[in-house]
């Protein structure tokens, strides 16, 4: 088992605590166990798997979002002897993305429910946005524009 300093930092588990433990059973959120096992099985069948998201449990029971790449680990005679997983903690990135999506949704809702007609036009002069008030005053729905 390989468990580098970054894995220790993210998970809180030392290498000694992980050696001999089932990755899937002990460190992966139950919702992701089947899919993570499938990724490991795929890598054990000599297929690389890239950009797979999973939820990892930390020692303090926090959940971290990990973007994982799994590659077959081969021995001297090119036989598969394991899997090398390289992961990136994307928990903060996902949190910021969800917040940006929430803000965009709030702004979209604000535009759509405003008491003034609001419309947007692209560089070709085509209408891209048409709120309810614009539809009410013009008689044309957003779909008709």
Image (spheres, grey):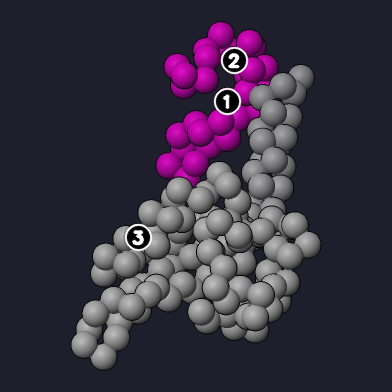
Locate residue 72 relative to residue 136 in the image: left or right: left
Dot 1: what SS? strand
Nearer-the-camera pick, 111 or 82: 82
Locate residue 135 relative to residue 110 in the image: left or right: left
Q: Earlier in the sequence, mark 2 or mark 1?
A: 1
Nearer-the-camera pick, 92 or 125: 92
Which circle, 2 or 3, is nearer the viewer?
3
Residue 135: mark: 2
Q: Earlier in the sequence, mark 2 or mark 3?
A: 3
Is residue 85 a member of the stretch shown in magenta? no
Label 1 environment density (alpha carbons within 10 Å; few <14, some 14–19, many ≥20): many
Residue 130: mark: 1
x, y (%) of residue 59?
Answer: 73, 65
Nearer-the-camera pick, 81 or 40: 81
Task: Please report the bounds of the magenta region as a residue range.
Answer: 116-145
Dot 2: what SS? helix
Q: Are marks 2 and 1 in contact (CB under 8 Å)?
A: yes
> From what the image shows, is residue 7 above or below residue 133?
below
Residue 96 seen = no
Disc 2 from disc 1: Cα separation: 7 Å
Q: Are marks 1 and 3 in contact (CB under 8 Å)?
A: no
Label 3 belongs to which residue? 41
x, y (%) of residue 86?
Answer: 49, 74
> From what the image shows, is residue 128 above or below residue 101?
above
Is residue 136 a member of the stretch shown in magenta? yes
Q: Earlier in the sequence, mark 1 or mark 3?
A: 3
Q: Dividing the picture into quarters, in which one does residue 17 lie?
A: bottom right
Question: What's the residue at 51%, 51% (across, down)?
Answer: 33
């Amino acid at each position: 088992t390989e468990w580098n300093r970054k894995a220790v930092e993210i998970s809180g588990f030392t290498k000694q605590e992980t050696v001999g433990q089932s990755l899937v059973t002990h460190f992966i959120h139950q919702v992701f166990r089947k899919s993570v096992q499938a990724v490991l099985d795929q890598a054990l069948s000599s297929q690389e798997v890239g950009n797979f998201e999973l939820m990892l449990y930390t020692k303090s029971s926090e959940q971290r979002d990990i973007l994982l790449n799994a590659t077959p680990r081969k021995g001297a005679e090119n036989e598969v002897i394991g899997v090398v997983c390289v992961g990136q903690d994307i928990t903060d990135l996902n949190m910021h993305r969800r917040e940006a999506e929430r803000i965009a949704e709030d702004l979209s809702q604000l535009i759509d429910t405003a008491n003034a007609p609001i419309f947007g036009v692209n560089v070709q002069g085509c209408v891209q946005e048409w709120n309810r008030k614009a539809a009410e005053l013009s008689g044309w729905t957003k779909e008709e524009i």
